[in-house]
Amino acid sequence: MALFRVERATPLSPAEAWRRLTDWERHGRVVPLTRVTVSGGLPRGLGTVFTARSGVGPLAFDDPMEVTVWRPPDAARGGLCRLVKRGAVVTGWAEIEVWPQGRGTRVVWREELRIRWLPRLLDPVVARVAARVFGRAAGALLAAS
């Protein structure tokens, strides 16, 4: 599996950084060639299921995910959200953490993903590309209002 980690600092409060990073449909606006839809129920919280559809035409695939840990930040601690990827093409997990840092917030995005049918030999390349894509996405989500 390809494991990567992205860190960002932002002047936003932990609560605002959390809100922006866990607004799943907004991810579709910042990840290239991707649309995100939330399946019924609450749009955010434990048990939320959403699907990122990435690609173009017949080369598109679904990346369904479920929120398995939901701990928003509060005055005493940082926040943690864990997603489990349950797709036919992409599997693995992702974690988004926010921590108070000075007058702003430190964000850590960790992800371990496996792309079925892709040789494990390419995992380091997948990790580098994914870190770049999700690093830009995190930056865009934190910058947008």
Image (spheres, rainbow, N blue to C red):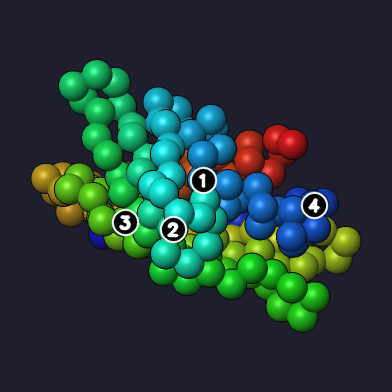
Residue ID at (33%, 32%)? 54
Cα–Cα span, label 3 and label 2: 12 Å
Q: Do the residues under discs 1 and 2 have CB atoms within 8 angstroms?
A: yes
Q: Judging from the image, what secondary structure is the residue with disc 1 in?
A: helix
Give the residue type at disc 3: Lys
Residue 37 rendering spot, x and y as whole percentages = 42, 39
- Which numbered marker is on residue 12? 4
Mark number, residue 85: 3
Q: Residue at x 45, y 28 (%)?
A: 32
Are the two marked residues, 1 and 3, in contact with CB atoms closer than 8 angstroms? no
- Front-most of 91 and 4? 91
User: Which mark is first along the chain, 4 or 2?
Assistant: 4
Q: How much space separates mark 1 and mark 3, taking CA atoms?
A: 14 Å
Tag of residue 24: 1
Q: Is residue 4 visible?
A: no
Task: Count neighbours of disc 1 (C-alpha within 10 A) and say few if under 14, some if 14 to 19, many if 20 or more.
Answer: many
